[in-house]
Amino acid sequence: KAGVTQTPRYLIKTRGQQVTLSCSPISGHRSVSWYQQTPGQGLQFLFEYFSETQRNKGNFPGRFSGRQFSNSRSEMNVSTLELGDSALYLCASSVGAAGDYYEQYFGPGTRLTVT
Amino acid sequence: TQLLEQSPQFLSIQEGENLTVYCNSSSVFSSLQWYRQEPGEGPVLLVTVVTGGEVKKLKRLTFQFGDARKDSSLHITAAQPGDTGLYLCARRGQGNLIFGKGTKLSVKP
């Protein structure tokens, strides 16, 4: 069974630009959660999508948004990039909604560098 | 806030040594998970502990959940270079996982 895939793996953007990251969950998984990982703050929850609906959202500004498609693939978008957005962005998929205690499986992440 | 404090932050040891890393909170939590994250990869779940005082073993790794369910420890016996990575503890939040900042372990041959 293929794992969670994320594209692209590496990305370099300039301040003020926007970026879209993609996550393909494990086949049959309906929930996708996004996390931001930085050396200073560690792993922080961005949002979770389940059956195309955002179920939960972390404490991030509105520049961070996401969506989920009918095939469970998910994208997250960051607009007006800031230097502080440089991070590893991880997505995790689970069979059921994350809040229902299903195990989450993480992808390898997208390393975003903002210059 | 129900933060998870992990210690030590960094640990560098020689192959064959034993080590223990800790995850502490001021709050009680219903369960705790341990993950290992290798460079360039996402975290991989190692174990979930649920019951106070619970001990789980995974080969050379021993996980313990404190009696009061406020702390947990991970002990590695005879560490190997393949154990190198970031060890994260996490608890359930409102539909998400809340992580500690991790212990970065380096095992030198």
Image: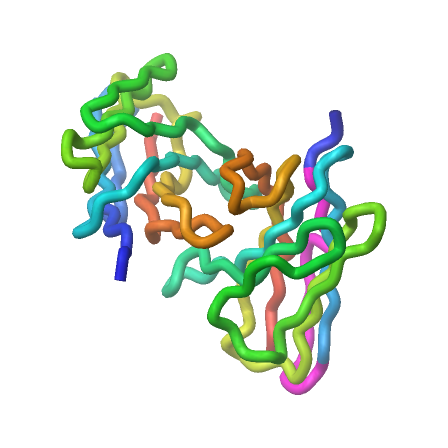
Identified at 28% across, 43% down, the residue is B29
Query: Residue B16 appears in which quarter of the rendering?
Result: top left
Identified at 26% across, 39% down, the residue is B12
Residue B38: x %, y % from top left: 49, 38
Residue A7 makes an appearance in the image? no
Relative horizontal placement of residue B50, taking residue B45 as reference (left or right): left
Residue B28: x %, y % from top left: 22, 44
The chosen color scheme is: rainbow
Q: Is residue A15 magenta?
A: yes
Tell which of B60 and B15 is nearer to you. Answer: B60
Identified at 18% across, 32% down, the residue is B66
| Residue sticking out furthest to the top | B59
Residue A1: x %, y % from top left: 74, 25
Identified at 27% across, 26% down, the residue is B51
Tell which of B52 and A90 is nearer to you. Answer: B52
Residue A21 makes an appearance in the image? yes
Residue range in magenta is: A4-17
| Residue sticking out furthest to the right | A70
Relative horizontal placement of residue B54, taking residue A114 as reference (left or right): left
Residue A48: x %, y % from top left: 60, 55
Tell me if residue B19 comes above or below residue A59 in the rendering: above
Tell me if residue B80 comes above or below residue B2 in the rendering: above
Tell me if residue B61 comes above or below residue A45 in the rendering: above
